[in-house]
Image (cartoon, helix red, strand yellow):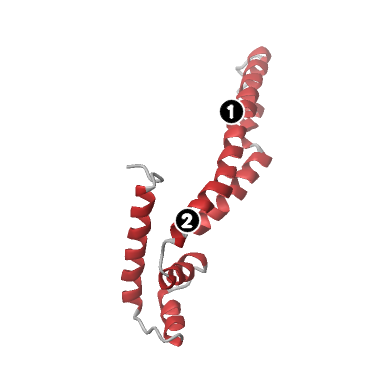
């Protein structure tokens, strides 16, 4: 799956996890050997951890993806030449095949073979990677 699609889907997936709250499922399936007192104590502790730590972390992560990540991608893309941005949009945003991209570009007067487009795209990714690294957005 292209990176942009992953980033776009993650906030919604986080929201779904928060709504479903699957983290409390284990509190409904204790083994018979557990005493009622232990079941209650563990359920209370797990519920507190989920409500105080896990769900807020999911909310914070989803919000980060909705704002910071998009802003960072937008900033990186703005550094590219228009033809590079167009190639990136067709491949990543529109999930077009190399043959489809070659066809579109040929119609616009920029005839290129799919293999050449892949190489161009790899160079663009390297430029983006270097820019993100210089900005401190990637771990080294």
Q: Residue at x 55, y 40 (%)?
A: 61
Front-lying residue, 29 or 68: 68
Percent across and percent down for residue 33 are: 60, 17
Dot 1 or dot 2: first in sequence order is 1
Compared with residue 28, is residue 129 higher up or lower down, i.e. above or below? below
Read off the residue under disc 2.
75
Q: Residue at x 36, y 61 (%)?
A: 125
Q: Which mark is residue 53?
A: 1
Mark 2, Cα crowd under 10 Å, few <14 / some 14-19 / many 20+, is few
Q: Looking at the image, how many numbered discs can be counted on the residues? A: 2
Q: Is residue 44 left or right of residue 9?
A: right
Name the secondary structure under disc 1: helix
Residue 30 visible, this orientation: no
Front-lying residue, 43 or 115: 115
Q: Residue at x 36, y 77 (%)?
A: 114
Compared with residue 112, is residue 130 higher up or lower down, i.e. above or below? above
Name the secondary structure under disc 2: helix
Percent across and percent down for residue 101 are: 44, 77
Mark 1, Cα crowd under 10 Å, few <14 / some 14-19 / many 20+, is few
Q: CA distance from mark 1 to mark 2?
A: 32 Å
């Amino acid at each position: 799956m292209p990176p942009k699609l992953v980033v776009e889907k993650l906030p919604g997936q986080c929201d779904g996890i928060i709504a479903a709250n699957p983290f409390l499922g284990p509190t409904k399936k204790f083994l018979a050997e557990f005493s009622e007192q232990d079941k209650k104590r563990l359920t209370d502790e797990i519920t507190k951890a989920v409500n105080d730590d896990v769900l807020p972390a999911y909310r914070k992560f989803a919000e980060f993806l909705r704002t910071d990540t998009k802003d960072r991608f937008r900033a990186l893309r703005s550094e590219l030449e228009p033809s590079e941005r167009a190639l990136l949009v067709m491949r990543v945003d529109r999930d077009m095949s190399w043959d489809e991209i070659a066809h579109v570009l040929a119609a616009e007067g920029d005839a290129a073979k799919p293999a050449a487009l892949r190489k161009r795209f790899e160079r663009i990714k390297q430029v983006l990677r270097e820019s993100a690294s210089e900005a401190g957005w990637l771990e080294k």
